[in-house]
Amino acid sequence: MIPKINKKYYEKASLYKMFATETMWRLNKELEVEYYEHPESLDFSKKALKTLYIYESTGKGKNPFPTTLFSTKKKFNGYAIGKRNMEITISMWQEEMSKIQWRYWMKELLNDYDPKWLKQIFKQQKHRDFIDEEVRRRNENVL
């Protein structure tokens, strides 16, 4: 039986898509590789999402994670690329949070990402407290 994609996974999928397209743009600027100039190389179809969902939830089906990206003739599962890029990015963020300037860096992240999502990523209480404090401070300044 094929599992049905739930609402929470659709929310994750929108993050995967964002991280896939954001990272491709950056790589295009840095590497100037032909593949990266073609966003149509990323497949964001319902079939691509279902392939990733089945693989993650059951471990069955085709592995959607590519072994190489240097091809202009192939479509890649955009959600799988986005998931991998998001995991790498989050890992780098967590490493940055262990450094002295983490408050400044956290403020930058709060400019671009949902505080609730950031609290799910950063488990240390000092980071979570800082997020709450910063959101409260920003809300007071709006009023």
Image: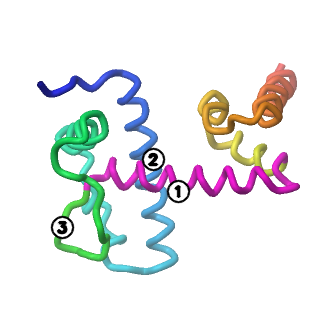
Q: Is residue 12 positioned above or below 68 on the image?
A: above
Q: Residues within 10 Å of mark 2 (few under 14, many from 20)?
A: some
Occupied quadrant, residue 4: top left
Question: Where residue 107 sits: x, y (%)?
Answer: 78, 43
Circle 3 is placed at which residue position?
Answer: 74
Q: Residues within 10 Å of mark 1 (few under 14, many from 20)?
A: few
Q: Can you tell which of label 3 and label 1 is closer to the viewer?
A: 1
Q: Per the image, is 89 magenta? A: yes
Q: Assign a secondary structure to mark 3.
A: loop
Indicate the quadrant containing the N terminus: top left, top right, bottom left or bottom right. Answer: top left
Which of the numbered marks, if any, corresponds to residue 88? 1
Q: Could you tell me the amino acid type at mark 3?
A: Lys
Circle 2 is placed at which residue position?
Answer: 18
Q: Residues within 10 Å of mark 3 (few under 14, many from 20)?
A: few
> Marks 1 and 3: in contact by CB < 8 Å?
no
Q: How many marks?
A: 3
Question: Where residue 25 sits: x, y (%)?
Answer: 46, 64
- Estimate the spatial distance between the alpha carbons at disc 3 and disc 2, rounded to whole Å: 21 Å
Occupied quadrant, residue 58: top left
Extreme residue toward the left, this view: 1
Q: Compare residues 111 and 97 and report the one nearer the observer.
A: 97
Q: Earlier in the sequence, mark 3 or mark 2?
A: 2
Q: Which residues are magenta?
A: 77-103
Indicate the quadrant containing the C terminus: top left, top right, bottom left or bottom right. Answer: top right
- Estimate the spatial distance between the alpha carbons at disc 3 and disc 1, rounded to whole Å: 23 Å
Q: Compare residues 124 and 133 and report the one nearer the observer.
A: 124
Question: Where residue 113 sits: x, y (%)?
Answer: 62, 39
Is 140 placed left or right of 15 in the picture?
right
Q: Could you tell me the amino acid type at mark 1?
A: Ile
